Amino acid sequence: MIALELTYRPFAPGWLIAVGAVVLVALCLFFVVRRPLERTAWLLRILMVAALVGILVRPGYGTVPAKAKTSDLEILVVVDRTTSMSALDWNGSEPRLNGVQADLKELTEEFPGARFSLVTFGAFVRTELPYSSDSQAFLAAAEVMTVEGAFDGEGSLVDMPLEVMTESLAGAKKRHPERKRLVVFATDGENTRDGAEQRSFDDIDDLVDGGIVLGYGTESGGKMPVDPEADIDSYIYDDATQQDALSKLDEPNLTKIAGEMGATYQHREAVGGLDKWADDVDQSFSNEDDEFATKNEVYWMFALGLFVLALIELALAWRGFHAARRELKQL
């Protein structure tokens, strides 16, 4: 569910609309020149392209007030995208990352109007989306997440995003101290980097009002495809055991991290079940009379024009069809 902050948004990216329109108009002009007997029809099609562009751009004029409902929550979501998150032991035999994506969708439904930020980590840490109340943008960023390649990293370390998390939460607290901050940490808790010791997450506790650590995987472990996108039946091989490598859930580590952050821990095995935790989160909304500015949209005029032009095009085609039939009868 998206916060009801009504803003001007085109149906498609501007560059895509511009390129498509130029190509179509150029094609129509080509036929205007090369087929003079059909000039009227091709000029009509140029007008249809212009009307279609108007629909896609969604122009508007002036401003009108719109009601808005926004939450006082700022939620930092941190997702593990190391190779182990491709292990096939979530919801039976699905990749763990599928479980993460399903859970993030549920979170947006449980916290309508909240501001979400998305951070991912693997061989490097990246902020995929800064804090935004546009849950559709958040879900789009989550949907395109992929695990890193089987040979991209040098072993995983769960505390990789700690500095970015601290900086993000501290910045959010400084900008809006009146808002509540939550952290959602999604991982299997597995550390595989040799010689590295996991740092404490204690500093996060001072920056948040709560949170949840979501644990993915099983104690028995799951196989990891070498290339999850292309060949799900070819698995990473463990030279030490001379068998397919297994990634296992490290539940004690996840419980420890949750305790350090002052968060709740929950093992995630299937879709659903986050509502009970969400119900315990203290969330308030802005006054429903709060107003935001939006445009008076006029794209419906272009849609009406396109409909009329399409009828004219159909009439011309019908007339041409009957003319062709008469000529055939005269032969």
Image (spheres, helix red, strand yellow):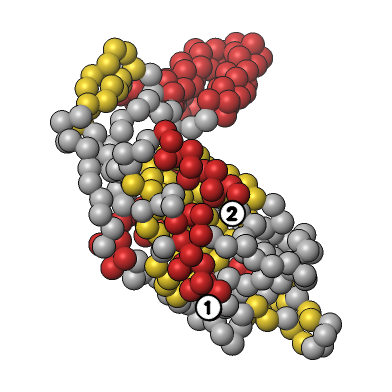
**Where's residue 215, x and y in %?**
50, 71
The reply to whether residue 188 is in sight is yes
Residue 74 vs residue 146: left or right?
left
Q: What residue occupies the far left of the structure in this picture? A: 289
Residue drawn at x 48%, y 32% as measured from the top left: 12
CA separation, marks 1 and 2? 19 Å
**Does label 1 or label 2 sit earlier along the sequence?**
2
Amino acid type of the residue tagged 2 in the rendering: Leu
**Where's residue 78, x and y in %?**
52, 55
- Which label is found at residue 168? none
Residue drawn at x 42%, y 72% as measured from the top left: 266
> 304 or 171: nearer the eye?
171
- Which label is found at residue 251? 1
Where residue 188 sits, quadrant-wise, is: bottom right
**Where's residue 282, x and y in %?**
25, 54
Amino acid type of the residue tagged 1 in the rendering: Glu
Query: What residue sits right under mark 2 in the picture?
Result: 162
- Against 286, residue 202 (above or below) is below
Residue 160 vs residue 46: left or right?
right
Q: Quadrant of the C terminus?
A: top right
Q: Residues within 10 Å of mark 1 (few under 14, many from 20)?
A: many
Q: Secondary structure at mark 2?
A: helix
Q: Secondary structure at mark 1?
A: helix
Residue 237 vs residue 59: left or right?
right
Where residue 67 sits, quadrant-wise, is: top left
Image marks 1 and 2: residues in contact by CB distance under 8 Å: no
